[in-house]
Amino acid sequence: MSEHPGEAIGPDTPCTILVAGGTPSDISVIADHLAKEGCRVLAVHNSVEVPACARESQPDLILLDLDSPDIDGLATCRRLKRDERTCNIPVIVMTLAHRGHDLAEGISAGAADYVPKPVRIDELMVRMWTHIELHRTRQRCILQQHQLFTDARRQRLVQAEHSRVHAELEQRVARAADELARVQSELAAQIDARRESDARLQGSEARFRAIVESGPVPMCITSMPDGYLLYANARLRELLHLDGQACATINLADFYVDPAARERLVRCLASEGGFRDAEVRMRRADGTQFWAMASACVANHEGRPAIHVGLHDISGRKRTEEDLLRSRDQQRELSAYLDGVREDERKRSALEIQEDLGQLLTALKMDMSLLRMRLTDDPEAIGRADDMRELVEGTIWMVRNVASQLRPAALDFGLVSALEWLLARLRQHDAIQHELHIEGGEPVLSDMQVTVLFRIVEAALTNVARHAAARRVDVTLVTGNGALDLGIRDDGCGFDLAAAYSRRAYGLLGMAERARSIGGTLGIDSERGKGTTVTIHVPYEGGSS
């Protein structure tokens, strides 16, 4: 029995308890406990009302007090047991423990159990739930017995129906035998047609196998999903150097150099049912490696799922591609080297112009000033001396400008100074408003890195001045989080990036190659009427000053 008496009944089968007699306090205590158990309690205080209430409500149990002055407990119990509608309802009588004769009479009157008074609620609850379960079990047995009688009657009807159906079935069998004879003759004709069709199919299969065997494409069929060879044509055997080995012992997975590449192809087969022109590195039976272009699809082979695979040796093409990539990398290295040489030559030329030619011109200017001071009586000579001095000053300015064009002196003071010099020159020559945003301070860079970034920004600002028709340029330098980010944004007319690249925009390509030479990447975002943004991202682990 469960620890909680009401659990055996279950929450879906609420009980109705009829309490007959008893003091109001006893009835209240009992009713409270029964209500907590989820029961419906009916209280009756009259001998006449007890049988009537029991017939109407059909309670699961009747709790009868033999000592109630308003109810004749023994007579009421006998009436309940004589009534066919209430005789099966269990009755528990309550009586004082010292009145043994009342207890015996109550049991003889048909009571199922008794509870001595004063009533102990725990004992009462256990006895009540026990008799309720017994009562419901008895009801189920009665229903099952009735069901058995119903099933027996139904079985007799079924047997009668079976006899009738059997007679009809014998007639149908006789008719079916005649039909079967006719069908057999038709089936024989179909079998002959099927044999002829199979013969044609075998001929087609033989022709197909001959085509596959003599075809130029290495092909095979593998089991799914383990990858053992079910069939391989001569070209595949030649490609993999199988030398007459039995297919059943060969697993195509053993010929993949990279197992992860095979797993990716298997997942593609599982999700999409096939793939085309996948490049994979494979090895032959003798250990030599080659590149193959593979195509595969999921199909059937002899009634089982299988994978049809075609391979094409592309080792020659891959070698050519690798040579091209190597040549391109070498070309980029050469281009970076030439840019470095060009910048060094510019730096050397700028220094020579500044130091040698600049000093000569300065000395010439001083000599012209001394000569001008000595010419006091010849106005024409004085005028010529002034013109010559102005010409020398213009030449000095031109020399300084040429030196700055070759290599600005601001580059020697860091990237921020170089950017400020570029923006100042842009505003001076093109009257374009500008603003420089610095986050993270002056980055500590090598001379080559500073020069490359300077040339990229110089090219971007030159494009803005020549083509963008912009009124404002914002330059942002952000250093931190392991990278250096440099951005140039203008509010100009913008351009079609795809069209520019299709016309071989060498300036944009040169900027991208310069960024790549220092391990960075260049990004360009532009749209007609919405300006242009150029970004340079360079991995950076240095500090800031």
Image (cartoon, rainbow, N blue to C red):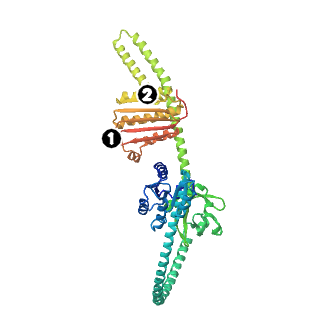
In percent of width and height, residue 330 lies at 55, 44
Secondary structure at badge 1 equals loop
Quarter residue 116 falls in = bottom right
Amino acid carrying label 2: it is Glu
In percent of width and height, residue 322 lies at 56, 51
Q: Are marks 1 and 2 in contact (CB under 8 Å)?
A: no
**250 shown above or below 495:** below
Amino acid carrying label 1: it is Gly
In percent of width and height, residue 143 lies at 49, 69
Quarter residue 379 falls in = top left
**496 shown above or below 71:** above
510 or 154, which lies in front? 154
Residue matched to label 1: 529
75 or 294, which lies in front? 75
Say which residue appears at 38% left-offset and 47% top-offset. 499
Specify whether residue 336 is in view. yes
344 or 411, which lies in front? 411
- In this rendering, position of residue 358 left or right of residue 322: left
Q: CA distance from mark 1 to mark 2?
A: 27 Å
Question: Which of the two labelled residues, at mark 1 and mark 2, occupies the earlier sequence position?
Answer: 2
- In this rendering, position of residue 262 left or right of residue 408: right
Where is the N terminus found, in terms of image quarters? bottom right
Residue matched to label 2: 420
352 or 518, which lies in front? 518
